[in-house]
Image (cartoon, grey):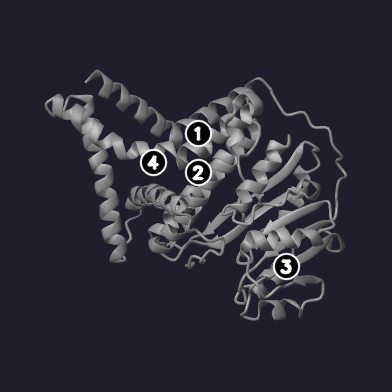
């Protein structure tokens, strides 16, 4: 029984650390750094205002083209210093023709569809500016986003800058919208603290930028292009910084089914990324970056979901042997788990009947997140995840 107790407490600690403990640790580290006046040294050019390329890899984005181009042209940065590059490979809905109507937009199109990463690999050959900013075709950027990104590149140690992903929410959002929005608010806070400590561990594909000279062509079957690209920049000795004032906003997934579809492909990509970035698991080589990477990403994509599967029967065994006594810690923890998963089940039941009880969306969304890891792992092992992802429907 002693062995079961040890396994239970180790599992509980890892689960807690993955979702909340690392956030608490970051909070304490940042508070201590601020208390003792520890700041990153900056040696750079305050007048740095380079040309940039706003790069969009788009597939069948006809419904968003007008709004996206209008948004891109309205951003607060010298117009003559912003190049607009769209790669529309495989699009057959008229997207390339719509884009060609706009002066100042470079359109590169091939009929063959090679997925987003194929379009990025091909399109980067046309980028001549020092900074390239990647953005999705169905997202709008905050008006100061380019300037806010460039401000961080004034530091020569910065190789990549991640903007913030914001979820547009309506008051009556369903579980997918409420859960996704809350998740990204928490993630944004962790990213701010990660960056202040040392480096963000992965950029958001909706809006991120790199120094063009640091671009490395990515394997054509890569699923999480933003994650791989940004972390390889960090592995080259630069940092990934984060600026929430540079943001991309999009609507949430239309429903939980669509959100699960999106999460599964991200989870499959997460497993692929952990394998391909295996050298980054070595803290003796990458130091703080490795620690942040393992704590913030690797555990959530690998060990933690597996432990969630085993901790309930371990907890039941310990509670049962304690006689299910309400004064026993194992009994309280067991019924706490049962209550949490019951709330997730009720959240699913109400969601299907379009009844909005937001307090139940949190456990429901948490369950969906971890379920997606199992489904994503199965998909990765089968090798049947195509880079030509089916877009999740948005609300």
Which element carries disc 3, helix, strand or loop? strand
Q: Which element carries disc 1, helix, strand or loop?
A: helix
Label 4, label 1: how far apart the Cα atoms are: 18 Å
Q: Residue at x 68, y 42 (%)?
A: 232
Task: Compare marks 3 and 1 and give the one earlier in the sequence.
Answer: 1
Residue named by callout 4: 305
Q: Nearer the viewer, residue 175 or 368?
A: 368
Identify the mark nearer the N-term, 3 or 2.
3
Residues at marks 3 and 1, CA–CA distance in whole angstroms:
37 Å
Give the percent coordinates (x, y) of residue 190.
Answer: 55, 39
* Residue at the (24%, 48%) spot, across then down: 342
Q: Is 373 situated left or right of 38 in this image?
A: left
To which quarter of the image does residue 135 belong?
bottom right
Q: Position of residue 214 (x, y in %)?
A: 77, 45
- Per the image, label 2 sits on a secondary structure element best described as helix
Give the percent coordinates (x, y) of residue 55.
73, 61
Residue at mark 1: 23
Residue 10 sits above or below residue 268 on the image: above
Residue bearing the label numbered 3:
86
Alpha carbon separation for disc pair 2 and 4: 19 Å
Q: Quadrant of the N terminus?
A: top left
How far is the residue under mark 2 from the one under mark 1? 9 Å
Q: Which residue is mark 2?
A: 186
Q: Is residue 122 above or below residue 238?
A: below
Tally of numbered tags? 4
Residue farthest to the left? 323
Q: Mark 3 and mark 2: span between their CA atoms? A: 32 Å
Residue nearest the viewer, comparing 358 with 349: 349
Pointers 2 and 1 in contact (C-beta within 8 Å) = yes
Question: Considering the numbered disc 4 on the image, is that residue within a helix, a strand or a loop?
Answer: helix
């Amino acid at each position: 029984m002693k062995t079961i107790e040890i396994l239970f407490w180790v599992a509980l600690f890892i689960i807690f650390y993955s979702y909340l403990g690392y956030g608490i640790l970051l909070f304490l580290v940042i508070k201590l750094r601020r208390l003792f006046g520890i700041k990153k040294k900056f040696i750079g050019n305050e007048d740095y205002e380079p040309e940039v390329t706003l790069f969009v890899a788009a597939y069948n984005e006809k419904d968003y083209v007008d709004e996206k181009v209008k948004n891109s042209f309205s951003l607060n940065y010298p117009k003559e210093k912003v190049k607009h590059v769209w790669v529309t490979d495989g699009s057959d809905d008229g997207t390339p023709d719509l884009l060609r109507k706009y002066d100042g937009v470079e359109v590169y199109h091939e009929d063959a569809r090679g997925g987003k990463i194929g379009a990025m690999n091909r399109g980067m050959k046309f980028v001549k500016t020092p900074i390239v900013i990647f953005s999705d075709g169905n997202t709008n950027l905050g008006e100061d986003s380019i300037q806010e990104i460039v401000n961080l590149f004034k530091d020569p140690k910065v190789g990549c800058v991640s903007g913030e992903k914001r979820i547009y929410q309506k008051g009556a959002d369903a579980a997918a919208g409420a859960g996704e929005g809350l998740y990204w608010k928490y993630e944004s806070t962790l990213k701010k603290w990660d960056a202040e400590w040392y480096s963000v561990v992965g950029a958001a594909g909706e809006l991120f930028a790199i120094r063009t000279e640091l671009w490395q062509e990515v394997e054509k079957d890569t699923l999480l292009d933003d994650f791989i690209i940004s972390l390889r920049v960090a592995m080259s000795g630069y940092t990934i910084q984060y600026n929430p004032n540079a943001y991309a906003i999009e609507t949430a997934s239309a429903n939980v089914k669509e959100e699960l579809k999106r999460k599964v492909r991200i989870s499959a990509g997460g497993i692929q990324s952990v394998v391909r970035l295996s050298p980054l698991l070595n803290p003796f080589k990458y130091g703080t970056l490795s620690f942040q990477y393992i704590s913030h990403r690797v555990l959530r994509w690998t060990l933690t979901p597996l432990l969630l599967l085993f901790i309930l029967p371990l907890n039941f065994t310990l509670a049962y042997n304690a006689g299910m006594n309400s004064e026993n810690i194992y009994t309280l923890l067991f019924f706490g788990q049962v209550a949490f998963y019951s709330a997730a089940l009720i959240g699913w039941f109400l969601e299907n009947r379009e009844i909005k009880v937001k307090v139940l969306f949190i456990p429901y969304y948490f369950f969906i997140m971890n379920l997606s890891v199992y489904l994503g792992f199965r998909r990765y092992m089968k090798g049947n995840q195509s880079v030509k992802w089916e877009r999740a429907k948005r609300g």
